[in-house]
Amino acid sequence: MYKAPVEDIAFTLKRVAGLSDAIDKGLFGDLGEDLVDAILSEAGRFATEEVAPLAEIGDSQGARLVDGNVKTPDGWAKLYQDWIAGGWNGLSAPEEYGGQGLPNMLNVAALEMWNSGATAFALCPTLTMGAIEALSAHGSEELRSKYLPKLVSGEWTATMNLTEPHAGSDVGGLKSRAERRVDGTYRLFGQKIFITWGEHDATDNIIHLVLARLPDAPAGTRGISLFLVPKFLVNSDGLPGRRNDLFCHSLEHKMGIHGSPTCTMIYGDGRFGEEKGAVGWLVGEENKGLNCMFTMMNNARLTVGMQGVAIAEAATQKALAYAKERTQGRAPGWTGSGMSPIIEHPDVARMLLTMKALTQGSRAISYVCAHAIDMSHRASGDKQHWQERAALLTPIAKSFSTDAGVDVSSLGIQVHGGMGFIEETGAARFLRDARIAPIYEGTNGIQAIDLVTRKLPLSNGGQVKGFIAELRDTADQVRRSNLDSFGETASRLDAAIADLEQATGWLLKAQADGKLAEALSGATPYQRLFGLVLTGCYLAKGGLAGVSDGAGESRIALCRFAAENLLPETAALRDSVVNGAASLAAARIALA
Amino acid sequence: MYKAPVEDIAFTLKRVAGLSDAIDKGLFGDLGEDLVDAILSEAGRFATEEVAPLAEIGDSQGARLVDGNVKTPDGWAKLYQDWIAGGWNGLSAPEEYGGQGLPNMLNVAALEMWNSGATAFALCPTLTMGAIEALSAHGSEELRSKYLPKLVSGEWTATMNLTEPHAGSDVGGLKSRAERRVDGTYRLFGQKIFITWGEHDATDNIIHLVLARLPDAPAGTRGISLFLVPKFLVNSDGLPGRRNDLFCHSLEHKMGIHGSPTCTMIYGDGRFGEEKGAVGWLVGEENKGLNCMFTMMNNARLTVGMQGVAIAEAATQKALAYAKERTQGRAPGWTGSGMSPIIEHPDVARMLLTMKALTQGSRAISYVCAHAIDMSHRASGDKQHWQERAALLTPIAKSFSTDAGVDVSSLGIQVHGGMGFIEETGAARFLRDARIAPIYEGTNGIQAIDLVTRKLPLSNGGQVKGFIAELRDTADQVRRSNLDSFGETASRLDAAIADLEQATGWLLKAQADGKLAEALSGATPYQRLFGLVLTGCYLAKGGLAGVSDGAGESRIALCRFAAENLLPETAALRDSVVNGAASLAAARIALA
C-alpha cells in the first residue's frame, strides 16, 4: 500500500527545486520550512490513510451512469467532502476568494500525493484548480465573486470542455455554437467529448468551462470563445437554482482511471429549461477563448505531469516491497539459506533502480517547473525570465513525467512476474491508469512540437542557452566535489549536456533555415533527451545538497546509477535529432 | 480490423529466414514454394475472417467459471472446432500421428496469424503443440499411441502445469506430490496456478502435463518428474471415460487475454474418483521431468515470442489505418485543403515507422529461430551448429519480440490519441494482452540470464562469434550494394555489430573470471542490444533480397530508418553492459 514519501518530496522541493532559497529570500512572505513540512506531512497522511485505500474500489466499480446521473464509486463522494474540509482544494488559490495563497510548488507536491493515492479521484480537483486559474485571470468581477469562493472551497467542481469528435489536438476545428442574448448572456449548443468529471454526485453544482463559436466568429482558433456554463443556474442568494440545459449523455469505457467519469456532454438540446440552449457567460473577450483556455491548459499540463510522477512513485513502492518479500532462486553472492529475495538478482535491482531514478527525475523536473511558475508571479525584476523558464519546462515536465509513469508502471508489472498481470495485485492498474497521461492535455507529440517551435526560440534562443549553462554548472559542481561515490557522473553529465546543446543548436538552425519538417522529425527524441539530461542534473543536485544528511549517500548512488546507465541514451537521441530526419522522410513509402 | 500480412510473412520466411534456400537444397522433401504460399494464404484467410472477428467478444466477455466448468466466450468453442477441422493444429506435428510434418517455420508463421487474430484464443493450441513435442520426444510408445493422435488432430487439448504459489521462475521449489502405484500408474496431489486453458468447454478431454515430486525425490530441480494426467481417464476404446480427480478451482482476473482461462488447478483432493489422487502416467524417467518440460518450454518460448510479433503487427495495422483516416492540424508541407491526415505529421510517422521496424525485426528474428530449429532436425552433419543457433536465438526471440509487443502496442495507443484509451477502439486491448508475454514462459530477465550464462558459452563462445561474423557479412553486403537508398545503414550496422561484439567479449570474460554478478547486471541491456542488431541486419537482408521486387524500395527505406534511428541505442546498451555493473551494485543502498 502506498505511503506518501514526504521526506523525498520535501527534500526535492527545498533543496533541488529552489523552495528553500526562495523562502530565505523572503519571496513567499512569512512561509517557513516548518509550515511546509507540516503541510506536506498532513497531506501525506491524508493521501496515505484516506485516499489510497479507496483506489481499488474506484477501479473495480468505476463511475456509473444511472438514469442520467453519474454515481461515483462507493465512498468517493464522502472522501471528496473530507478532502475539501481539510482545505486542500484551495492550497495555492487566491486568498481573496478563500484560498491559502501558498506557492504553487506546494500544491503540486500535494497533487502528487493525491494522484499516488488514486489518480482517478485526484483528477476531479485538478480540473477545478485549472478553472480557478482561468477565472482568476480572465473572468469578470461578477463571475469571479459569484463562482470563485465556491470553486476555491471545492464546494463546486469545474470542468474543461474542449474536445469534440473532430476537434482534439486541433481544437480550431470545434463546432459548438454560442448565441448572444440581449441580457448579455449566451446560449450554448453542441456536443463535447472526453469531459473529465463532467457529471458526478459529489457536489451540488458543477461549473463547466466550454469553448464554442459565435455566429460571426472567424474560422479556426481565432474564432473561439470561452463560456462559463453551470450545471445549475446560480440564484441571487448564491445557491444552485434551476437546471441548465446540459447533461451527460454517456460515459466512456476506458482502459484505466475507471473511477473518473469521462463524459460526453450535450449542451442545449432542450432537455432542461424552458428555452433551448444552455445558459452561459462569456469568460474574457469574444474570440479570445483560446488564450483563456491556455491559462488553464498550462496549469493542467504540469498537473498531468504530476500524474505520471505520482503513478511512478506508487508503482515503485509496490514493486520494491514485493521484490523484498518474494523469494525465487539464489542470486549470485547470496549467502542466506534457501531462496533469495528477488531484489538480490541484479536484473531486478536494475529495474527497481531505473524506476526510482525516473520517478525522482520526473518529480524534480516537475517541481522545478512549478517553482518557475511561482517565481514568475513573485520574483521582482525577472518575471520574463521565470515565465520563459516555466514555459520551457512545461512540455518537458508533462511529457517526460507521463512517459515515466507508463515506463515505470510497466516495469513494476515485470518485477511482480505473473502476479503483476493479476488485477488483484494492483500493479496492472498503475499501467492502465498511467496510459492516458501521455495523451490528454496535449499529446506528448504536441508537447514536443510546442517545445521545439515555441519554447526553444524564446528570447531568441537565449532562454534555453542560459538554462544549459546552469546545467553545466551542476556538472562542474559534481566534478569539484571530488566524491568518489559519484563515479563517472561528471563526465556523463558533460557528454549528455553536450548532446543537448548540439541538438538544440541544430533545431534552432533548422527552424531558422525554414526546415520545419526536419525539426519536427526530431521533436520527440529531443524532448526525451532534454528530460534525461534534467534527470541527471537534478539527481546530481540532490546528491550534492544532501552530502551531509543520512540519505545523502544513497542519493549520490542513485544519481551515479542514472548517469552511468540511463544517460548514455542521450547520444542516440541526439543522433535521431540531427541525423534522423532524412531517413524518416524517405521511409514514408513504407507507410503507404 | 486485422488483415493477415501474408506477403510480408512469406517474404520473411523465404528470403530472410532461409526457407527458400532450404527448399532449394531439398531439406524439406517435396515441399515447394507454391505449397508454402497456399498454406500461408489459407491460414491468413482463416485468421482474418474467422479468428479476428471473435477477439473483441473474447476480451469483453472473458472466460467464466460456472459451477466448476469453464465457459469460453460466445463462438469460441465453434471457432476451435472449425480451426482443427482445417488441420491447423497438426501443421508441423509428426506425420505418424496424423500431423502434416511441415517445417516448424510454417507453423510459427501460422501461429503469428492466429495470435494477431486473437491471442487469447491462439494460446490454447499453443499449449497443445508444446505437449505434442514433449510427448513425442519423451513419452512411452503406449502414451504416444494413446494420446498423440487426439492431440495432433486437436480433438483434445493439453496444458503445462509448472507454477505453484511459491515456485514460479524457480520451479525447483514446487511441492506437488506424486505417489507410485503397483500398476505402474501414479497418483498426484497438489495445487497448480496460472494454468492456461486448464479447463474449458471446447473439447471433450484435456491432457495435463504436470510436474511433481516423488516421495524419495532429491530436493530442487533434480527431483522433479513429469506426469500425464488427463481430465477424463481414457477407456480402452480410446474414448474419455471416468472423471479424474482434478478440477479447476478458480480463474484469475487478469489485465488482458481475458478469453483465455487462467486456472488454479487442484489435483487429488478427492472430489472425483473413488480413491483420492489424480491418476497420472510418467513421461520420460523419474526425476528427469525438467528435461522433458524444457522440450516443451523451448518451443513455448518461441511461440510466446510470436505473441509479441503478432500483437505488434495487429497494433501497427490498426494505428496505421487510423493515422491515414484521422485528420488534425496541418502538417508541414501539407498542401491539401483542410486538416491533414495525422500520418503526415513527422512525429506520428516516426511512431508508425518505429512500430513497423520493431514488428518486422522481431518477426524476422523469430522466423530465423524457427528455421534453426527446423535445420537442427533436418540438416545433415551440422546438427550441433543448428541446435546451438536455435538455443542462442530462443531467448532473444522470446524477449525482444515480447518487449516489442508491449512497446508497439503502447505506441499504437499513442497514435490513436484519446480514442486509444477507449476500450471500444481496440487499441488498448493490444497492450493489455501484450503485457503478459514478457513475463510467462520465463520472464525476459530469466531469458537474459539464460542467454548470458548458458547460450554465450556454447562451443566455448564459438557459436556467438560465428553468428557475429555472419552479421558482419550482411553489413558488408549492404556496403557493396552501393545503393544510395540504404543511406548510412552499412556504417550503422558496423557500429552496432562492434557494440555487440565488445559486449559479448566482456560478458564471456566476466564469467570466465568468475564475476557472475557483474555479468548478470548487464544481461538485459545485452539481450536488447542483440535484438536490435538482429533487427538491423534482418531488415537489411530483406532490403538486399528484395531490390528487384515492387516492395523492395520500401523495405530498404524502413531498414535505413531503423539503422539511423533505432540502432544508435546499441552504444548506450553496450555501455550499460561493460560499465554499468559497478554503479548498479553501489546503488543498492538506494533500494534499502
Image (cartoon, coloured by chain):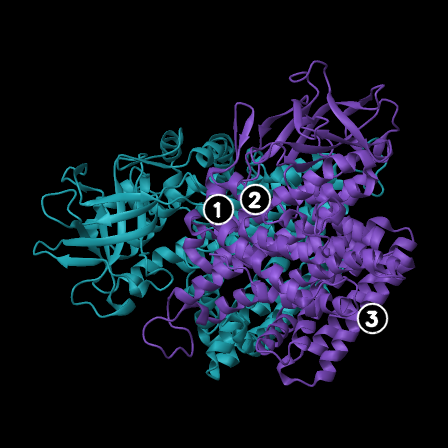
Chain colours: A purple, B cyan
Q: Secondary structure at mark 3?
A: helix
- The crowd level at tag 3 (other Cα within 10 Å; few <14, some 14-19, many 20+) is few
Task: Report, in whole angstroms, how far the alpha carbon at label 1 lies from the one at label 3.
Answer: 45 Å
| Dots 2 and 1 on the same chain | yes
Q: Please give the residue where the numbered disc 1 appears in the rendered image.
A: A54
Please identify the quadrant where the C terminus of chain A is shown.
top right
Q: Is residue B354 visible in this depiction of the protein?
A: yes
- The crowd level at tag 1 (other Cα within 10 Å; few <14, some 14-19, many 20+) is some
- Classify residue A391 by image quadrant: bottom right
Chain for disc number 1: A
- The crowd level at tag 2 (other Cα within 10 Å; few <14, some 14-19, many 20+) is many
Q: Are marks 2 and 1 in contact (CB under 8 Å)?
A: yes
Q: Residue A359's x, y, as percent?
A: 61, 61
Say which label, 1 or 3, has the lower sequence index.
Answer: 1
Say left or right for A309 vs A473.
left
- Classify residue B333 by image quadrant: top right
Viewer-nearest of discs 2 and 3: 2
Q: Compared to B526, does A460 lie above or below?
A: above
Q: Secondary structure at mark 2?
A: helix
Q: Please give the residue where the numbered disc 2 appears in the rendered image.
A: A121
Q: Residue A106's x, y, as percent?
A: 68, 58
| Dots 1 and 3 on the same chain | yes
Say left or right for B126 vs B318.
left
Q: Residue B549's x, y, as percent?
A: 68, 44
Q: Please give the residue where the numbered disc 3 appears in the rendered image.
A: A469
